[in-house]
Image (cartoon, grey):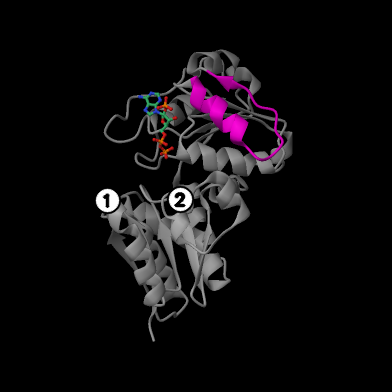
Amino acid sequence: MKKLFAVLGNPIGHSMSPVMHNDLFSLYNMNAVYLPFQVKEEELKEAVNGLRALGAVGFNVTVPHKSTIMPFLDEIDELAASIGAVNTVVNQNGKLIGYNTDGLGFLKGLDEYVTKIEDHKILVIGAGGAARAIYFTLAKENPVQIDIANRTVEKAVELITECPYSITSRALTLEEAGNYLGEYDLIIQTTMIGMEPNTEEQPISLENINKQALVCDIIYNPLETSILRDAKERGAAVQNGINMFVYQGALAFEIWTGRLPDIQRMKENVLRQLGGK
Ligand code: ATR
């Protein structure tokens, strides 16, 4: 029988996950299908129970359901529970277990650029859902320091207070972060600033950047945001959001099938969908 996988979100039309996972199923000769479902907030519980009843092997959860889905699952992995959001669910004999591969996906994607994360002083720009997943996941790796800069500083303070892992952190305004920028080895942009169609916008000035730093943006549309272009021009290394997206999917695939898939093929697939190379 064909195995069912899915992604629940609203909207969901632009999700690149179905093409990415269906391609892996064909690569590995799996009799499986991955389908997108647009699900309204008030129908999420029915949708989750429906997938359980249909015997779906696993599914992803995206905006706006990552937190609201949690009460409808049977078990939540420790990291996902601390982040307060789930993006991957596996069905183990009718028991739905929730994971969060967003932060881990970012961390894995970083492996290609960073060898010892514990030696790094890190700046996270933004304090929303994505920042939370990345901050908590990185904090667990015990780096020297992770500061959080946000337009609304109170939200950065909240993230730091709620982090379950021991880490030295400061909550900063975007302007303060700009002033201290030379201190950081790794700068991670997690807001939607610079995303299509406002591609000229940038959250902070890079005037004081350390040229040895790596600047990551979680945005992949455009592939090169204004902050990445600026960082590159100043001699810093850069990474766009493709790695995080691909690795969060690869880790979900591994949770469902026990196999870490072909990352390079996934990247090429996603780039093709974005109209890149
Ligand atoms: P996500 O789940 O994608 O992280 P989110 O939870 O809505 O989205 O968080 C959006 C982040 O982008 C927040 O850090 C937000 O700053 P505030 O907490 O001050 O709202 C930041 N953000 C969005 N638009 C911004 C803008 N125009 N200028 C500065 N920060 C912005």
In percent of width and height, residue 130 lies at: 47, 40
Say what secondary structure mark 2 lies in: helix
Q: Quadrant of the N terminus?
A: bottom left
Query: From the viewer's perspective, is 162 left or right of 150?
Result: right
Q: Is residue 89 above or below residue 83?
A: below
Residue 169, magenta (yes or no)? yes
Q: Can residue 189 be spotted in the picture?
A: yes
What range of the chain is rendered magenta?
153-172
Of callouts 1 and 2, the N-terminal one:
1
Residue type for callout 2: Phe
Q: Quadrant of residue 221?
A: top left
Q: Is residue 57 above or below residue 245?
A: below
Residue type for callout 1: Pro
Beta carbon at label 1 within 8 Å of ligand 1 = no
- Quickly name the residue at label 1: 11
What residue sits 52% from the left and 78% below the top? Answer: 93
Residue 141, magenta (yes or no)? no
Query: From the viewer's perspective, is 28 left or right of 122?
Result: left
Label 1 environment density (alpha carbons within 10 Å; few <14, some 14–19, many ≥20): some
In percent of width and height, residue 265 lies at: 46, 62
What residue sits 59% from the left and 44% below the top? Answer: 110
In percent of width and height, residue 88 lies at: 48, 59
Q: Quadrant of residue 75?
A: bottom right
Label 1 and label 2: CA atoms lie apart by 17 Å
- Quickly name the residue at label 2: 245
Q: Nearer the viewer, residue 160 or 151?
A: 160
